[in-house]
Amino acid sequence: MRNANIILYITVLFWVCIITWANFASLEEVTRGQGRVIASSKIQIIQNLEGGIIEDILVKPGDLVSPGAPLIYLDQTLFQSQLSGLIKEKQAAENNLRLIEEERDILTPLVEQGVESRMELIRLLQRLSDAEAQLLRLGETQPILEDRLARTIVKAPVEGIVNRLLVNTTGGVVQPGEPLVEIVPIEDDLLIEVEISPKDIAYVLPDQRAIIKLTAFDFAKFGSLNGKVINVGADSIQKEDGSIWYICQIAVSG
């Protein structure tokens, strides 16, 4: 009888412990979702304002490029010709201005002495004003042409990885403003954009710890990344297949 009482006491104590633990203990809920890696800032889309003919393509998708690295060469013939012609025209304008100034220096005292007509001096000063205006215009145009010539070398604006080449034919024609190359900046923090099922969204909160496994790599060999939930979408989205998801963002911390 005494042994039966002891067994009953132990059994009751066991269930009291179980009930107490169930009321106060918390179980960790694991939520899984599919996602994709994105950059924290937008992908850089490289364009050329003037367009032209592709002379050479120096990079391919996956290449790491530094700021200022050449990506594509466009044919320079047109802009070189324009710049060369302008430089010659500017030199001629400078010579013409110098001759007119010399003529003015000679004519001015003659007019003051009454040897030459004042009207002749007025016409000369008008020619001088026109020559100065022409030289000023050419001087303002030269850096514009130099800039256009420099932009025939399409360069990377940031350090990053070439994501896509939007042109791929040497000798092909590029339209003004046409996108040429996509670069993903590598100095930015990487974010994981994750799709969470509506039935699990209640368990996902900002600042929660996340474990990231990239499907492109063997988990057993390369392990996983740690992260933290930084944003939980307030509204659901519906995909083309009719499925409904919430979008969350996770910052990769290592």
Image (cartoon, rainbow, N blue to C red):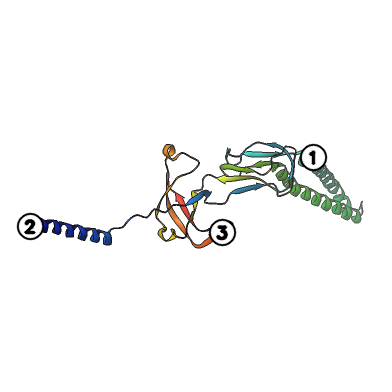
Identify residue type, mark 1.
Ser
Q: In the displayed structure, does residue 231 sit left or right of residue 169? A: left
Q: In the displayed structure, does residue 123 sit left or right of residue 234? A: right
Q: In the image, is residue 234 above or below residue 168?
A: below
Where in the figure is residue 135, as x and y percent of width and height? 79, 48
> Which residue is denoted by mark 2 in the rendering?
2
Badge 1 density bin: few <14, some 14–19, many ≥20, Cα 10 Å: few
- Look at 57% across and 41% down and name the residue there: 161
What count of labels does the image hold?
A: 3
Q: Report the residue that reaches farthest toward the bottom.
A: 235
> Which residue is denoted by mark 3 in the rendering?
242
Q: Nearer the viewer, residue 226 or 21?
A: 21
Q: Earlier in the sequence, mark 3 or mark 1?
A: 1
Per the rendering, the mark at residue 81 is 1
Q: In the image, is residue 141 above or below residue 233?
A: above
- Element assignment for label 2: helix
Identify residue type, mark 2.
Arg
Identify residue type, mark 3.
Gly
Where in the figure is residue 174, as x and y percent of width and height? 73, 44
Quarter of the C terminus within the rendering: top left
